Amino acid sequence: QLQASGGGLVQAGGSLRLSCAASGSTFSNYALGWFRQAPGKVREFVATVDWSRGSTWYADSVKGRFTIARDNAKNTVYLQMNSLTPEDTAVYYCSAKFGAISSITTSYDYWGQGTLVTVSS
């Protein structure tokens, strides 16, 4: 029900925009989030946005470089990623949870399939 897209190969310093479209549900009152998982590492929180007020929360590692936004009319959440570094290389997953935003992976109920972002040095 969550379909992520927009990943690819980019040089360090470049930008990418990820999209995640929700289908089969409007995800009303759901917070939407992005997580990532690099090879050999655990999945980590990147950013999240709530349903109604647009409140956001970012991991320290991406604050000031990434921007999360949602279009409720399109049932879509975006992640604009600027000033990318090789450390941002990972599979990026979109996710949804009912209620308030959270950085805790296990609090999210729905997950997309992931989209690979590779940043070359």
Image (cartoon, rainbow, N blue to C red):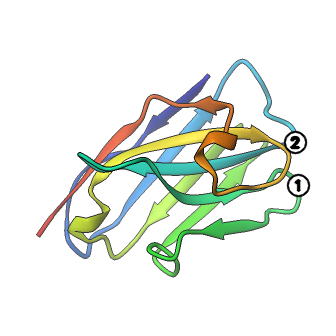
**Relative to 99, 8 lies left or right:** left
The disc labelled 2 sits on which kind of residue? Answer: Asn
Helix, strand or loop under label 2: loop
**Which residue is located at x 56 percent, y 68 percent?**
67
**Relative to 59, 116 lies left or right:** left
Whole-percent x, y for residue 45 in the image: 53, 56
Q: Relative to 107, say whether 83 is above or below.
A: below
Q: Relative to 8, say whether 115 is above or below.
A: above
Mark pair 2, 1: CA separation: 7 Å
Residue named by callout 2: 29
Residue named by callout 1: 52
**Which residue is located at x 64 percent, y 30 percent?**
110
Whole-percent x, y for residue 73 in the image: 78, 41
The disc labelled 1 sits on which kind of residue? Answer: Ser
Q: Residue furthest bottom?
A: 64
Residue 74 appears anywhere in the view: no
- Quadrant housing the N terminus: top right
Residue contact between numbered discs 2 and 1, judged by CB atoms under 8 Å: yes
Q: Residue furthest top?
A: 24
**Which residue is located at x 59 percent, y 34 percent?**
21
**Relative to 23, 119 lies left or right:** left
Q: Relative to 28, say whether 65 is above or below.
A: below
Q: Which mark is residue 17?
A: none
Whole-percent x, y for residue 97 in the image: 74, 39
Helix, strand or loop under label 1: loop
**Which residue is located at x 26 percent, y 71 percent?**
85
Whole-percent x, y for residue 13 in the image: 25, 76
